Image (cartoon, helix red, strand yellow):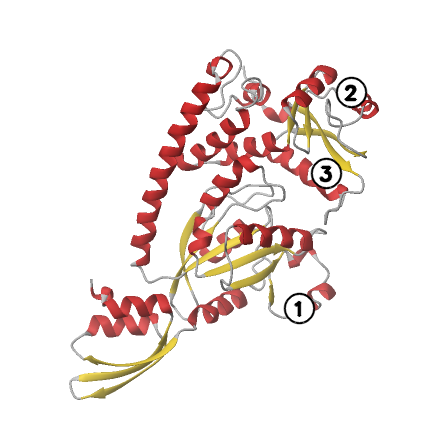
Amino acid sequence: MIEDSRFTRTLVVHPHITGEKSHRSPKSRLEEAAGLAEALDLQVMDKVIVPLRQITPATYIGKGKVTEIEALAAQRNAKLVVMDCRLSPVQQRNLEKTWAAKVIDRTALIIEIFGARARTSEGKLQVELASLEYQKSRLVRSWTHLERQRGGFGFMAGPGETQIETDRRMISDRIAKIKRDLESARRTRGLHRKSRAKVPYPIIALVGYTNAGKSTLFNRLTKSKVVAEDKLFATLDPTMRIIKLPSNRKAILSDTVGFISDLPTELVASFRATLEEVIEADLILHVRDVSSEESDAENRDVLSVLENLGIKNKPMLEVLNKIDLIAHTQIGEIGSGKIPISALTGKGSGQLLQIIDKKLTGGKKIKIKIPTSEGKLIAWIYEHGEEVHAKPDSDFLQIEFKMNEKNLARLKTESVLE
């Protein structure tokens, strides 16, 4: 019988290089690493910060600390140690030998979580590609422990299976095939986006640090039931739903994967693909956990990722979530231009929809003359325009209205009549 990963006793270690500049405290980094482990249903028995002046080539941390953790692992009967850093294959091997436990680094842990969360075939391919890129220099034993615990994801092979027998050439061949499959999936998604462009609904993308409450807000606004857990990376594959705004106009709301600091390089490409909907969005809602002690640091991380994706000068609203977890006096201190809400209780969600509606209105003022026989076109203008005023003129209607660029482009091509 395959043992469940919830019974894997785990230590979480955050090596902190003293003197290294960071906008996050070692304690918050440790808590995040423990949260990542718990997101994989590992049983965290203990978590420790290891201060070090410099990295030791053979074991990353110094000999004394290696001995201390060896004793702690034995005391806690830990079968797995998560190192919140990037380990070389040699460092991983040496630590496993000394501690008599499986050792994985931050990169392996996040790839495992992405693998557990991926639901679509494309998402699974992205994670497989990331894992193969990671394994390239290791070839064997990277995944055997967690594979045994949960039975694997179906593509990360365990002991005695194909992975141990796989050589570098076979990995490279597999990587090439996955890249071809992903390129095909991207082309298909591009076609879907083109067909969506014919639907005159603006796209609103939710972004934010992982566990900021995006999926809870998504469910609140769309009245749907997307998985919303108090876990890091509860959402990986993008989810889209149509919402109705207070003006009765419709928009498409997209939920996306949560951002995180120090994202493994192997996952950057798949992360970028997952966030293509953000790049195409008409409006971005940046959801922040206002109750988090690291809210400002998380904000910087999110803005940094958006900048790396080349997302600049795009309309954005800053949504401060989880006000139900902070004192009433703190809510009053929230600056202008930021929208305080509680996605869990619904407080502030009505105001948020009003602001979204107003933000998406914009557009130019247009005056046109339309034959009264064009009932379908006139109805479409009333549905998608703002401040619509019509005046009869013989067999025509003189209509004055405001409309955003996307709908105006459709109106000019008369594609609304198709």
Quadrant the N terminus occupies:
top right
Residue 210 makes an appearance in the image: yes
Question: In this image, 395 relative to 119: left or right?
Answer: left
> As shown in the figure, which amino acid type bears the numbered disc 1?
Gly
Residue 6: give x, y in percent of width and height. 62, 27
CA separation in Å, label 3 and label 2:
19 Å
> As shown in the figure, which amino acid type bears the numbered disc 3?
Leu
CA separation in Å, label 1 and label 3:
30 Å
Up-down: is 263 above or below 148?
below
Residue 70 numbered mark, or none? 2
Question: In this image, 69 relative to 172: left or right?
Answer: right
Residue 335 numbered mark, or none? 1
What SS does tag 1 mark? Answer: loop
Residue 291 makes an appearance in the image: no
Quadrant the C terminus occupies:
bottom left
> As shown in the figure, which amino acid type bears the numbered disc 2?
Glu
CA separation in Å, label 1 and label 2:
49 Å
What SS does tag 2 mark? Answer: helix
Residue 37: give x, y in percent of width and height. 64, 33
Name the residue at 55% across, 30% down: 112
What SS does tag 3 mark? Answer: helix
Give the camera-side residue of 366 and 134.
134
Q: Which residue is mark 3?
A: 30
Pointer 1 with pointer 3, Cβ within 8 A: no
Name the residue at 23% across, 71% down: 377
Callout 2: 10 Å neighbours few (<14), some, many (20+)?
some
Residue sitting farthest toward the bottom = 393
Residue 46 numbered mark, or none? none
